[in-house]
Image: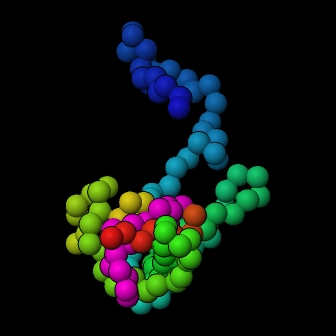
Amino acid sequence: MRKIKSRRRTTGGLRKAKRKGRKHEISRESILCKVSDFDKRKTIDAMGKEKKLRLRNAQSANVTDPETGETVTESIKNVLENPANPHFVRRGAITKGTVVETENYKARITSRPGQNGQANAVKIE
C-alpha cells in the first residue's frame, strides 16, 4: 500500500502530482451477498484480461460434512450469526464465517461469496 502524502508543501503551496492513478490502484465498493430466492452473479474485469465473479444473491450453498467428506447443495433459509458484523444478520448478508440455516442443518460459510462467486460451507453440530 502506497503512503499518501499531503497535497500541500510545508510552505503552503500545492504539490504537483508525479503521475496519474493507475487502473489497478482503484478500488470498488464491496458487494454484499444476500439471501434470496435465486442466484445472481456479476462479472467484473480484473487485471490481465481476467474476470472475477461476484455472488450478489445466494439461494443455495455447497455444504460439506467434515466427518464423511460428502458435499451436497442445500438451499439457504436464513442467516443466524455473522461474526464480521452483527447488523449483517438483520440484512441477510453472507460473508466468510457466517452461520446460515439450511434445509437440514446449520452450516458455516468458508468461501468469500462476494469475491469468488460461490457459497461453500461446512456443516456444524
Q: Position of residue 27 (x, y in %)?
A: 52, 49
Placement of 89 over or under 27, stated as above or below: below
Placement of 83 over or under 103, stated as above or below: above
* Point 35% across, 65% down: residue: 98
Residue 81 sits inside the magenta stretch: no
Give, as a single range, the part of the protein colored magenta. Answer: 99-115
Looking at the rendered structure, the number of numbered marks drawn on it comes to 0
Residue 44 position by quadrant:
bottom right
Placement of 14 over or under 89, stated as above or below: above
Of residues 2 and 57, the one nearer the viewer is 57
* Point 59% across, 42% down: residue: 25
Q: Position of residue 58 (x, y in %)?
A: 46, 79
- Residue 118 showing in the rendered view: no
* Point 31% across, 55% down: residue: 84
Q: Position of residue 120 (x, y in %)?
A: 51, 70
* Point 45% across, 68% down: residue: 122
Residue 10 in the figure: left or right of residue 52 = left
Residue 37 in the figure: left or right of residue 89 = right
Q: Name the image colouring.
A: rainbow
- Residue 12 showing in the rendered view: yes
Judged from this view, the residue extending furthest toward the top is 11
Judged from this view, the residue extending furthest toward the right is 49
Of residues 108 and 16, the one nearer the viewer is 108
Looking at the figure, which quarter contains the C terminus?
Answer: bottom left
Q: Position of residue 41 (x, y in %)?
A: 56, 76
